Image (tube, grey):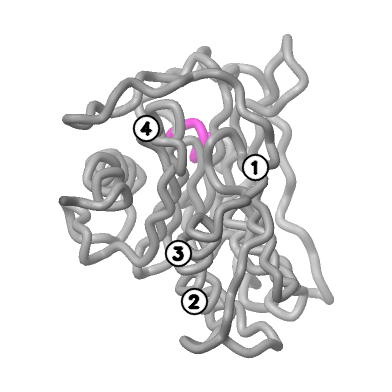
Amino acid sequence: MPTWSNIVLTALLPYVSDFAARVQLPNPQPITQSQVLVCLPDTERRVEGFIMLTNGYRFWFERGHIWLFYAPTAFNDVQDPKLIPRYYGEVHLNKTQAIAAARDTLKRLGYNEKMLYADFEPKVVLPPKVDGHTVARYQVEWESPNRSYTSVSIEIDATTGKPLSIRLVDNSLNKADPVVDGVPPPDLKPRSSMQPISEDIEKAQIAQSLRTPVNDLIKRLQLACEEIGPDTKLEVSGYQRRGDVLGVAQLTNHFEFTPEQGSPVL
């Protein structure tokens, strides 16, 4: 019998493939399970979750759509200042072209500008200067005019014009969960942001699911800490969500694994 993780992964892969094709990611199409490094499904039986591909691209699926995406070269995902030189580069796009690239990204994803307020003037963070070098990234954002949140945030590579991170937050985007045979409709009641874990089996399952992504990110970000070995006891004391997607997992070895930020935090 398929595990819940495999059921969710099978249901979400067509969405990931479609998203990847629309933003022209360098992945063979369609994306298959062999290209998936991590799948962290919702633990309360919604067909939602977090997927990381073997080449470092990450996707968060919630309420019937991909609401958050990070390329492995996204600058706003960096937490270690020592890594900033990796993002130095030439700026080939001006501000107007960067805005056009962000709007084109929304269009390719199938969204019109008005539904996400992208027909208004955006807030644009220009490529920052660091130690005499330029970080070749624009951040283009559109805020909801009648609510206190940013509906669209897109990081644009200032050299190539490609989107490196995409965040979409608006109720108009919400759709029904993918249909999975034999799984009852989800309970849509609100959930608290902190879910205490009291059962040993739940702790063990979540700890095991985090071991590989934590080690991968330790290596990817070259953090000054040892990887978690196969014999290392790893326990989870609690976790938070962004909606129904895992946001922060507190481990008893003093790690916090934060998929939204893209790295473990000591």
- Circle 4 or circle 3, nearest the eye: 3
Residue 161's x, y, as percent?
Answer: 48, 51
User: Which of marks 3 and 1 precedes in the sequence?
Assistant: 1
Q: Which residue is identified by label 2? A: 216
Tell me how far mark 4 sits from mark 3, CA to CA: 30 Å
Residue 219: quadrant of the picture: bottom right
Q: Which residue is identified by label 1? A: 195
Q: Is residue 226 left or right of residue 2?
A: right
Crowd tier of the residue under label 2, counting other residues whose Cα lies within 10 Å: few below 14, some 14–19, many 20 or above: some
Crowd tier of the residue under label 1, counting other residues whose Cα lies within 10 Å: few below 14, some 14–19, many 20 or above: few
What segment is highlighted magenta in the picture? 100-105
Numbered badge on residue 209: 3
Residue plotted at (48% across, 59% down)? 201
Q: Is residue 147 left or right of residue 105?
A: right
- Marks 2 & 1, CB-CB < 8 Å contact: no
Q: What's under tag 3, amino acid-wise?
A: Ser
Q: Which residue is identified by label 4? A: 109
Camera sees residue 92: no
User: Which of marks 3 and 4 precedes in the sequence?
Assistant: 4
Residue plotted at (45% across, 73% down)? 212
Q: Is residue 240 magenta?
A: no
- Circle 4 or circle 2, nearest the eye: 2
Question: Image height check: is 49 above or below 218?
Answer: above
Tell me how far mark 4 sits from mark 2, CA to CA: 29 Å
